[in-house]
Amino acid sequence: MKGSHAISPLRELRRPTGEGREDVRRLQLIEATVTTIAKRGYARTTLAHVTDHAKLSRGIANFYFKSKEALLLASLKHLTDEYAAFWRRALAEAGDSSADRIGALIRAEFHPRICKRERVATWFAFWGEARTRRAYSQVCATSDQEYFKVLAGLVQAMIDEHGPATLQAEAVAGGLSAMMNGFLQDYMLDYEHFDRATARRTCNLFLAGLFPAAFADRVAVDPGKNPRPRRARTTPEPTSAVETLPAWTYNDAEFHALERARIFRLTWQFACHANDIAEAGRYVTLAFAGERVFVIRGRDGQIRGFHNTCRHRAAGVAAGSSGCMTRAIVCPYHGWTYDLDGKLALVPGQDGFPDLDRAAFGLVPIDVEIWQGLVFVRLAGDGPAVATMMAPYAEELAPYRIADRVAHGGDFWVAESAADWKTLMDNYLEGYHIPTGHPGLQRLFGANYQVEARDHGVGRAFSVMRDEPSRVWSERAYQRVLPEIAELSEGWRLAWVYYNLFPSTTINIYPHGINLFQVLPAGPGRSIVRGRNYVLPGADRAMRAATYLGDRINNLVYWEDDRLVRSVQGGLESSAYNVGRLSTREVCLRRFQDEIRKHLPVARQRSRPAAGRMAALNGSHA
């Protein structure tokens, strides 16, 4: 959030630097108590459970707290002090108006630094015991009374300013408090599906009914923020195939040739980011479907794409994966020279080519589209634009400022895979394998994984990081250091989102940066993976640390996937496997395989066609 509505991370909620060993041990025991109560419940929590979790002896616990009851009371007071410090800070950072200050209290109530599963569960556990334990009751009452007094005072100021005078401030404050407590109970019972944005909006709706002039604008969706995605579709259309593609399609030379001609030559392929070729003459090359191409920025600032083939004797004119040709494009073989817009400008020894029409011998152009700063190329075809295909996600992607990103971590990385390109995409397009195949992602996200498929072979998977700290250092450190990003709304600040663009371009969005990679066919049963990371320039130290840790996590995921796809490729080439079954959860995968069948109808055949018959059979099914 921006401006006066922002709530900064509270430094006072973190362990102060230089605090004494005694304070560290006390806090260690208190945090262990909170976690233990959240997991086991109040009645089943013992001092032994707490000390085991804290990895401290019972003697140390007795030294600092004398008794279990003293430790429990200190833990309750720690929670109330933490909560009070947070909402007080929220008020201090809010605007001057009563509406701004009430809005700050609502946001603080559902802020992920306070509205965390273990803390909410522990607070309710203590609250349930407060009726029979006077000390607990006093702590809870003191905290509640201070908060309610402040809230009622702000409501009274709203009544004085906006009316109507017949409203009673304490009644309005009580109703709002009850509503917020009800949402906290919902969160505790179903935290994975709890929507903080909906909770805040509902509270604002309540206030807008009483004070429309002050709260009506807080109910509308802010166009500058990406709204939290609705519950995604998880059931494909009835026409979607239940069977997988037949195994023979994953390692067949004739089928591979059809894929290159009828899929990859006719669809958009990611080339680079526009900022990769920011200056005139900068270029990036790409090879796919048996073709070499490159994109280059002209002196007029325009980005164009061409076949990377000299019109004289077919040599490549752009060398390497990237480079710069500031003055002209010069073929290294015989020196034929082209302007940056592809026109043939100079032919050495031109008198040897008496009938040469230079206007007809420029570099052969290809289609180029720039979408949110990403440069896509297409060899042929007239299918929909990238902007049309990705239109359903344009609004939610806008706050990530993709067009402003710059490359991070060096040049494009390229890796060969001993698996078919479809094997890799099959793996990418489903989260069904995460619990067993990616322990780290399971620790970070749990079962919180939503997928949906759209028209034109576009889809998305969405997952939000859990509140519980991971037990693995790099993951836990990532959770801790990841800064809040003002441009992102509540539901997206901890989200990892994966978009796919048929056939094999992926756009992976993280709070710390974005990653684009594509899978290109290199031969029957073989593929090449090409990718690059992009970040916003000027990142602070915390964001740089989060980027490093996020890359570390994803590198492990890559190697886990590599092991899985090589295993699958071996099975696809086994006589024991022909077709498999697809789960209703594998929505994007089902749509992807449907797209393959649409482009190549011969893939509907369970058995491999006779040699030399593939193209004819495919044409007869068209």
Image (spheres, rainbow, N blue to C red):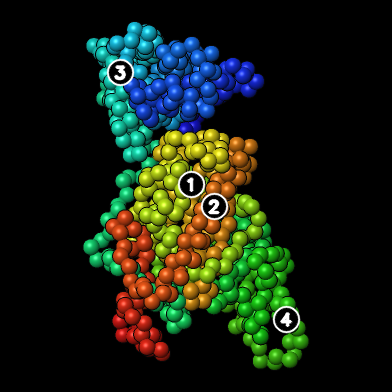
Amino acid of disc 4: Tyr
Q: Tell me the residue that label 3 is attached to.
A: 128
Q: Quadrant of residue 580?
A: bottom left
Amino acid of disc 1: Gly
Assess whether mark 2 and mark 1 are in contact (beta carbons under 8 angstroms).
yes
Q: Quadrant of residue 429?
A: bottom left
Of residues 511 and 456, the one drawn nearer to the viewer in this rendering: 511
Res 351 seen here: yes
Q: Tell me the residue that label 2 is attached to.
A: 556
Quarter of the image that includes the C terminus: bottom left
Spatial distance from mark 1 to mark 2, Cα to Cα?
9 Å
Residue at x 23% of width, y 11% of height:
166
Amino acid of disc 3: Gly
Residue furthest right in the image: 349
Spatial distance from mark 3 to mark 2, Cα to Cα?
43 Å
Nearest-to-viewer mark from 4 and 2: 2
* Dot 2: element: helix
Q: Position of residue 546 (x, y in %)?
A: 57, 41
Amino acid of disc 2: Leu
How many neighbours does mark 1 have within 10 angstroms: few (below 14), some (14-19), or many (20 or more)? Answer: many
Nearest-to-viewer mark from 3 and 4: 3
Of residues 379 and 30, the one drawn nearer to the viewer in this rendering: 30
